Amino acid sequence: MEGACEASLACSTCHVYVDKDHYDKLNEPKEEEDDMLDQAPALRHNSRLGCQIILRKDLDGIKVTLPPITRNFYVDGHVPQPH
């Protein structure tokens, strides 16, 4: 997972699918998160930006899955290196 914007809600490279047992325990997404998710490919009902998930004790055991593709909004010509 790239996390291109460093949690500033300016991209959707940390888009994840949250498991059903934990999705409803998450804080409601901010409007900015919803705006970024609207632009994320392969959006699902359980989509969230991973950078906005604040880990707490009640989220112990949370499982997230990466979507098949992500979209990066770099404007400075940066090319990410493979992991």
Image (tube, rainbow, N blue to C red):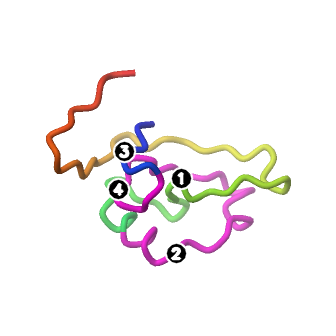
Density class for disc 4 (Cα within 10 Å; few <14, some 14-19, many ≥20) is: many
* 3 w.r.t. 40: above or below: above
What's the amino acid at mark 1?
Cys
Q: Which residue is mark 3?
A: 4
- CA gap, disc 3 to disc 1? 10 Å
Q: Position of residue 23 (x, y in %)?
A: 67, 61
Q: How far across and how far down the image is residue 35, in percent?
A: 37, 72
Residue beneath the point at 74% across and 65% down: 25
Tag 3 and tag 4, C-beta contact below 8 Å: yes
Contact, mark 3 vs mark 1 (Cβ under 8 Å):
no
The region drawn magenta spans 7-35
**Is 46 on the left or on the right of 63, as rendered?**
left
> Label 3: few (<14), some or many (≥20) within 10 Å?
some
The residue where tag 2 is placed is 30
Measure how far apart labels 2 and 3 are at the Cα level. 19 Å
Taking the magenta stretch, the answer to whether it contains residue 10 is yes
Furthest-bottom residue in view?
31
The earlier-in-sequence mark between 2 and 3 is 3
Which residue position holds label 1? Answer: 51
Residue nearest the observer in this picture, 2 or 17: 2
Q: Considering the image in quadrants, where does the N terminus appear?
A: top left
7 sits to left or right of 38: right
Q: CA distance from mark 2 to mark 4?
A: 14 Å
Q: CA distance from mark 4 to mark 1?
A: 10 Å
Of the image marks 4 and 1, the number of the one nearer the N terminus? 4
Across and down, in percent, residue 39 comes to 30, 63
**Residue under numbered circle 4:** 11
In the rendered structure, which disc, 2 or 1, sits on the residue that comes first in sequence? Answer: 2
Q: Is residue 61 left or right of residue 33?
A: right
